[in-house]
């Protein structure tokens, strides 16, 4: 997914999710009583089972990294790459026209966890160019990490949900075969067998995997914005002309289309 299109595609993604839910609702209600498709045991097995399996395979550091997700998502939603490029060029022009230390006050207006803030702070500390480039490269490698983590967890859950549905199908069939002498119990057991498969497939392909692809798009957009900031810090450190920086940033945006 292209990074620049992430924000524009968000309403389309929401519309697609709502349309999918509407299709399912229409299909269930058209068949009569929609409560026939509600099976608490099947839901518990698929939803809770998927959650616990993903949790058992996750590191605590992964889960802690998700705490920054809402803040970074709000920041991405408000930031357009083209407008951000113009802001960064203007920022670099000011830094070249004035002494870099006059921009110290600007640091208080920047998000502390942004690459621009950290890069400018190191620049004002008098870091050598090589040290600054190495630091910015490390910062860029970590850009979008919460989104990457979320995408990996969602994709893992999307792969687990159908498997849990299959497990539920086996459980339901075993229960059905064990109660062949009680015809009144065969129907509920068969419902568990069939509905767990349905729940697993729907949960994976209508919710988890689309969200994983969306999170991957957010990660790409976050890396794109971090790359723009990295190039800006380096341009300020080298006192490059603003036109030169603008050309480089436009090339980066063009490659991301």
Image (spheres, grey):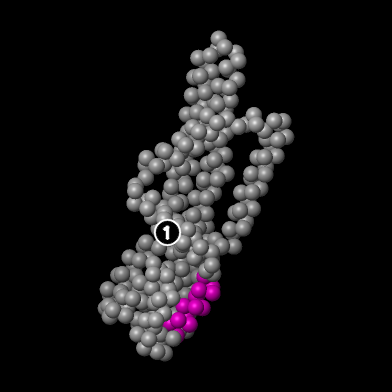
Q: Name the residue under label 1.
A: 68
Q: Is residue 148 magenta?
A: no
- Asked if 104 appears above or below 159 in the picture, the reply is below
- Mark 1, Cα crowd under 10 Å, few <14 / some 14-19 / many 20+, is few
Query: Against 174, is 145 above or below?
Result: below
| Whether residue 102 can be seen here | yes
Using the image as rendered, state which of residue 112 and residue 251 is in the foreground: 112
* Residue 187, x across and y down, in percent: 60, 20
Q: Nearer the viewer, residue 184 or 202?
A: 184
122 lies left or right of 175: left
Residue 191 in the image, given as x and y percentages of width and height: 58, 25
Q: Residue at x 40, y 58 (%)?
A: 145
Q: Could one spot residue 162 in this view of the protein?
A: no
User: Which residue lies at the image location 69% right of the left edge and 30% below the top edge?
Assistant: 33
- Report which quarter residue 239 is drawn in: bottom left
Residue reaching furthest to the top: 181
Horizontally, residue 245 falls left or right of residue 28, namely left
Q: Which of the 4 image quarters holds residue 121? A: bottom left
Total residue callouts: 1
Give the residue at x 28% y 79%. 125
Q: Where is residue 87 in the image (x, y as percent from the top left)?
A: 49, 78
- Residue segment shown in magenta: 81-93
């Amino acid at each position: 997914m292209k990074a620049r299109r992430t924000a524009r595609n968000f309403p389309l993604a929401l519309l697609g999710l709502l349309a999918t839910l509407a299709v399912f609702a229409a299909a269930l209600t058209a068949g009569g009583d929609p409560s026939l498709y509600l099976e608490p045991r099947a839901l518990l097995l698929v939803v809770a089972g998927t959650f616990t399996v993903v949790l058992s395979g996750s590191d605590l550091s992964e889960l802690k990294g998700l705490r920054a997700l809402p803040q970074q998502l709000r920041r991405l939603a408000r930031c357009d790459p083209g407008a951000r490029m113009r802001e960064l060029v203007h920022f670099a022009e000011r830094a070249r026209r004035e002494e870099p230390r006059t921009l110290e006050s600007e640091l208080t207006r920047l998000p502390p966890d942004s690459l621009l803030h950290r890069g400018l702070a190191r620049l004002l500390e008098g870091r050598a160019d090589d040290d600054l480039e190495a630091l910015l490269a490390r910062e860029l490698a970590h850009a979008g990490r919460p989104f990457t983590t979320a995408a990996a967890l969602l994709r893992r859950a999307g792969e687990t949900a159908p498997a849990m549905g299959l497990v539920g199908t086996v459980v339901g069939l075993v229960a059905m075969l064990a109660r062949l002498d009680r015809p009144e119990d065969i129907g509920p057991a068969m419902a568990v067998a069939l509905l767990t498969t349905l729940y697993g497939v729907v949960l994976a392909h209508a919710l988890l995997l689309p969200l994983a692809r969306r999170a991957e798009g957010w990660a790409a957009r976050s890396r794109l914005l971090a790359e723009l900031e990295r190039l800006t810090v380096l341009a300020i450190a080298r006192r490059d002309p603003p036109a030169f920086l603008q050309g480089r940033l436009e090339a980066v945006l063009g490659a991301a289309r």
